[in-house]
Image: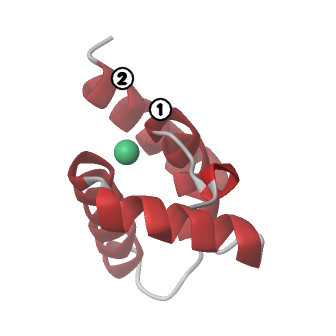
């Protein structure tokens, strides 16, 4: 009904990292979640990244993931997904 609420895949991917870090504002999260409900490819990507984050955390115990490492993983993922 309201096209303003819809975000496209590009926007969804951009918000995904913040969403998984719980840094996204509530409105942004809701829009992203609505997109993930409709979009299988973004949903798969979100699940993949979520699991990756979880496994990184588990491998490092309860310590916070060092930002530079996580950033490298994210860049690597980005390259894989976008086929760079
Ligand atoms: Zn999408």
| In the depicted structure, whether residue 75 falls above or below residue 36 | above
Color style of the picture: secondary structure
55 lies left or right of 62: left
| Outermost residue to the bottom | 62
Q: Which residue is mark 2?
A: 79
Residue 52 placement: quadrant: bottom left
Which residue is depicted at the point 49% across and 43% down? 13
- Cα distance between the residues tagged 2 and 1: 6 Å
Q: Tell which quarter ligand 1 is in.
A: top left
**SS at mark 2?**
helix
**Where is residue 3 shown, x and y percent of the image?**
61, 50
Evaluate whether residue 63 shows in this view: yes
Is 46 displayed left or right of 67 in the figure? left
* Residue that numbered label 1 is attached to: 75
- Residue 36 against residue 77 in the figure, above or below: below
Q: Residue at x 64, y 54 (%)?
A: 67
Give yes or no for contact between labels 2 and 1 (Cβ–Cβ under 8 Å).
Answer: yes
Relative placement, left or right, of 67 versus 46 is right
**Residue that appears at 35% across and 37% down:** 77
Crowdedness near tag 2: few (<14), some (14–19) or many (≥20) residues, C-alpha within 10 Å: few
Query: How far across and how far down the image is residue 57, in percent?
Result: 41, 75
Secondary structure under the numbered disc 1 in the rendered image? helix
Q: Position of residue 43 (x, y in %)?
A: 29, 59
User: Mark 2 CB in 8 Å range of ligand 1?
Assistant: no
């Amino acid at each position: 009904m309201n096209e303003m609420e819809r975000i496209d895949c590009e926007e969804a991917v951009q918000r995904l990292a913040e969403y998984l870090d719980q840094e996204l504002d509530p409105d942004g999260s809701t829009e992203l979640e609505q997109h993930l409900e409709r979009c299988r490819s973004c949903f798969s990507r979100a699940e993949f990244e979520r699991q990756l984050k979880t496994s990184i955390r588990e491998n490092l115990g309860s310590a916070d993931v060092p930002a530079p490492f996580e950033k490298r993983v994210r860049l690597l993922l980005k390259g894989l997904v976008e086929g760079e």
